[in-house]
């Protein structure tokens, strides 16, 4: 099976957040599937400056295809605009401007996805928040899995995210708390969903507390998280029903 990951940043030195979660899952699935990551050339999520070279790379057994961002982020202007949009009535065009100002803004990645999406059996999008997910999920919802890594914050109340959460064929949650929050906030129409965890082994070991895997290691829950992505197969097997339900072709 050929699986494409879409994430805002990707690199062995990025050790936190959804990017790290994405890398752990991609590396696990690459042991059994043909995996490719579509990402930007950014290393820094504040500026989104292009620091990695554009093109194809190979990182820990995973093919990584990088695309240059069209521009960097003016964090002061973005923060000011965010304060305004979260507090005032506004249009969808205002929200799309906010999405571009937030970054990363990477039309080249989206163009590649539109041209090549049929070459993937499944597309896995990490993080609901950024433009590569918001615009990338629209390309082919029927083969898309969303890993939202979401929590209650002002941005998630924007109208563009109501549209986003209706789209994916499958949703993979990190926690049941996240799942309950999203299912009570949005109309989620996915044909498959799982709580896959996020790399913390909650099984009791010799100590009294939960065992946490060291950086670079894989906890039992990371392995389970990767195994739960067998919902890729489940989603694929039910893809025809999803397409019919949503009139997708």
Image (cartoon, rainbow, N blue to C red):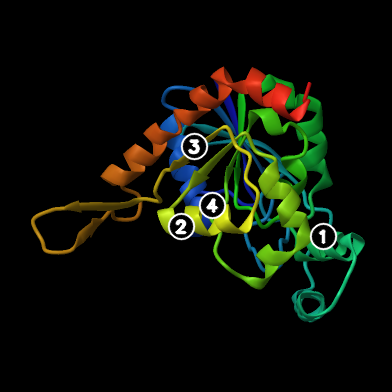
Q: Earlier in the sequence, mark 1 or mark 3?
A: 3
Callout 2: helix, strand or loop?
loop
Q: Where does label 4 land, which residue?
A: 19
Callout 1: helix, strand or loop?
helix
How much space separates mark 1 and mark 4, taking CA atoms?
Answer: 20 Å
Callout 3: helix, strand or loop?
helix
Depth check, mark 3 against mark 2: the one in front is: 3
Depth check, mark 1 against mark 2: the one in front is: 1
* 11 up-or-down from 228: above or below: below
Q: Name the residue: 75% across, 75% down.
A: 75
* 160 up-or-down from 124: above or below: below
Nearest to the observer: residue 196 or residue 30: 196
Residue 3 in the figure: left or right of residue 88: left
Q: Where does label 2 land, which residue?
A: 15
How much space separates mark 1 and mark 2, taking CA atoms?
Answer: 25 Å
Q: Where does label 3 land, which residue?
A: 26
> Are there few (<14), some (14-19), or many (20+) residues within 10 Å of tag 3?
many
How much space separates mark 4 and mark 2, taking CA atoms?
Answer: 8 Å
Depth check, mark 4 against mark 2: the one in front is: 4
Q: Earlier in the sequence, mark 1 or mark 4?
A: 4
> Are there few (<14), some (14-19), or many (20+) residues within 10 Å of tag 1?
some
């Amino acid at each position: 099976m050929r699986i494409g990951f879409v994430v805002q940043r990707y690199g062995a030195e990025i050790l936190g957040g959804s990017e790290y979660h994405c890398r752990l899952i991609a590396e696990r699935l690459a042991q059994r599937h043909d995996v490719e990551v579509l990402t930007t050339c950014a290393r820094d999520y504040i500026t989104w400056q292009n620091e990695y070279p554009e093109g194809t790379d190979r990182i820990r057994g995973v093919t990584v295809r990088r695309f240059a961002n069209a521009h960097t982020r003016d964090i002061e202007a973005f923060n000011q605009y965010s304060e305004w949009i979260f507090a005032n009535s506004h249009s969808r065009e205002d929200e799309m401007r906010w999405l571009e100002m937030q970054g990363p803004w990477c039309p080249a990645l989206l163009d590649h996805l539109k041209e090549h999406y049929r070459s993937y059996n499944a597309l896995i999008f990490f993080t609901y928040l950024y433009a590569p997910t918001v615009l990338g999920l629209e390309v082919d919802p029927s083969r898309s899995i969303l890993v939202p890594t979401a929590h209650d914050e002002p941005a998630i109340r924007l109208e563009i995210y109501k549209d986003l959460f209706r789209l994916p064929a499958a949703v993979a949650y990190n926690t049941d708390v996240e799942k309950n929050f999203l299912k009570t906030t949005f109309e989620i129409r996915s044909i498959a969903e799982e709580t896959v965890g996020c790399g913390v082994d909650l099984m009791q070991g010799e100590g009294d507390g939960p065992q946490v895997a060291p950086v670079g290691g894989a906890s039992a829950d990371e392995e389970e998280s990767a195994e739960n992505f067998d919902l890729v197969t489940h989603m694929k097997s039910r893809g025809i029903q999803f397409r019919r339900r949503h009139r997708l072709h």
